[in-house]
Image (cartoon, helix red, strand yellow):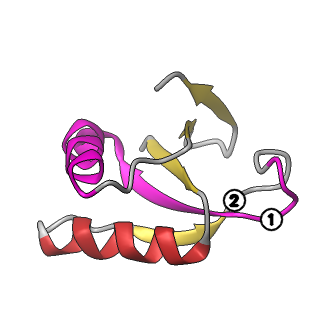
Amino acid sequence: MINYLMICRSLTYAQKAAKVLERAGMTVSVTRTPPGISEKGCGYCIKVPERRLSQALEMLKSADLAPTKIYVLFSDGNYSEVGL
């Protein structure tokens, strides 16, 4: 299963974004960003299933909570940045 990591600018933004998506019926989780992804040493992201990515992006942009970066997280644990 492929998931996407939507990088947020702070824990507060990640929590707010998760609430917006959960209200729409999405199952998401707030996690720390994996080592090597975060530019500032630590960060938080929202893990979103592949099938819900476009819907999640639209909702977050509407709520002014768009992610700073997006990474695809493969089932083997590897990840790769995706352009916004």
Mark 2 lies on residue: 33
Instruction: Name the residue at 44% across, 77% down.
Output: 15
Closer to the eye: label 2 or 1 = 1
x, y (%) of residue 77?
67, 46
| Callout 2 secondary element | loop
Which amino acid type corresponds to the residue marked 2 in the rendered image? Thr
Which of the 4 image quarters holds residue 54? top left
* Residue located farthest toward the top when viewing the structure as drawn: 83
Which amino acid type corresponds to the residue marked 1 in the rendered image? Cys
Instruction: Name the residue at 57% across, 37% down.
Output: 71
Instruction: Name the residue at 34% across, 40% down.
Output: 50
* Residue located farthest toward the front when viewing the structure as drawn: 64
Task: Name the quadrant of the N terminus.
Answer: top left
The earlier-in-sequence mark between 2 and 1 is: 2
Crowd tier of the residue under label 1, counting other residues whose Cα lies within 10 Å: few below 14, some 14–19, many 20 or above: few
Label disc, if present, on residue 42 of the rendered structure: 1
x, y (%) of residue 21?
24, 65
Left or right: where 59 falls relative to 11: left
Left or right: where 42 falls relative to 49: right
Q: What stretch of residues is rendered in magenta?
A: 39-63
Dots 2, 1 in contact, CB < 8 A: yes
x, y (%) of residue 67?
48, 47
Instruction: Name the residue at 13% across, 69% down.
Output: 25
Residues 13 and 22: in front is: 13
Q: CA distance from mark 2 to mark 1?
A: 7 Å
